[in-house]
């Protein structure tokens, strides 16, 4: 700051304008890079159709109640209902192709936490009794998956602070192991 004050007034004005420009460009780059759209998936998948048919999140993502990861359903699980249902749809035809080739569907992750963060779906869904929508948004009422929240430390702590055992949930080792 002293360096800027020691400059002639003309240069101080230019330095101020440059500083403001740098801050604005930086803010733009941070927010523009945070796309709310989910990554492109190998098969168009509409959660809204599944929820409309009465299928619960935990039917397909059954690991959420018993393990750290919610899991992605296997091709075999999907084929348990398809192709008799919507056999002519392009998505089901693509599913059948993976089944016939005995290949897993290469789904792209929508949420990715840093390696130093420990998150356990079982604790949140099973023990704490939270529902999927709390973190993933109202996926069942939109045709295309989207990034509902920026899962960062501040966002997690804002939820932990509201819980009955908030002091214990703010201990760093709860999430950083």
Image (cartoon, grey):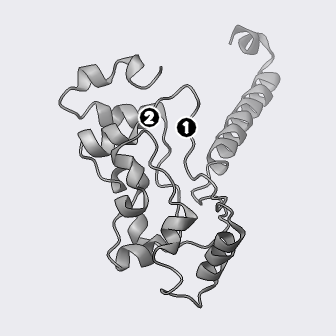
Pointer 2 or 1: first along the chain: 1
Seen from the viewer's position, the closer of residues 6 and 107 is 107
* Residue placed under numbered mark 1 in the picture: 113
Element on which disc 1 rests: loop
Element on which disc 2 rests: loop
Q: Is residue 86 above or below residue 18?
A: below
Q: Is residue 85 left or right of residue 163?
A: right
Residue 11 percent across, percent down from the top left: 82, 23
> Which label number is shown at residue 2?
none
Residue 64 percent across, percent down from the top left: 38, 48
Seen from the viewer's position, the closer of residues 57 and 59 is 59
Residue at 58 percent across and 29 percent down: it is 115
Q: Residues within 10 Å of mark 2 (few under 14, many from 20)?
A: some
Instruction: Quote the CA–CA distance across marks 2 and 1.
Output: 8 Å
Q: How many marks?
A: 2
Q: Is residue 129 above or below residue 14?
A: below
* Residue placed under numbered mark 2 in the picture: 119
Mark nearest the camera among 2 and 1 is 2
Seen from the viewer's position, the closer of residues 167 and 16 is 167
Q: Is residue 115 left or right of residue 134?
A: right
Seen from the viewer's position, the closer of residues 163 and 74 is 74
Q: Residues within 10 Å of mark 1 (few under 14, many from 20)?
A: few
Residue at 67 percent across and 40 percent down: it is 24
């Amino acid at each position: 700051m002293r360096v800027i004050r020691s400059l002639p007034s003309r240069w101080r004005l230019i330095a101020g304008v440059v500083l403001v420009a740098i801050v604005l460009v930086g803010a733009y780059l941070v927010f523009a890079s945070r796309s709310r759209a989910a990554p492109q998936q190998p098969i168009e998948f509409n959660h809204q159709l599944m929820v409309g048919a009465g299928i619960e999140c935990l039917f397909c993502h059954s690991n959420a109640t018993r393990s750290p990861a919610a899991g992605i359903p296997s091709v075999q699980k999907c084929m348990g209902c398809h192709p008799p249902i919507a056999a002519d749809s392009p998505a089901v035809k693509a599913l059948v192709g993976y089944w016939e080739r005995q290949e897993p569907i290469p789904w792209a992750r929508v949420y990715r936490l840093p390696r130093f963060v420990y998150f356990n779906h079982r604790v949140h869904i099973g023990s704490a009794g939270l529902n999927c929508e709390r973190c993933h948004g109202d996926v069942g009422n939109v045709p295309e998956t989207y990034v509902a929240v920026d899962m960062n430390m501040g966002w997690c702590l804002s939820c932990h602070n509201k819980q009955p055992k908030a002091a214990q949930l703010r201990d760093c080792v709860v999430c950083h192991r």
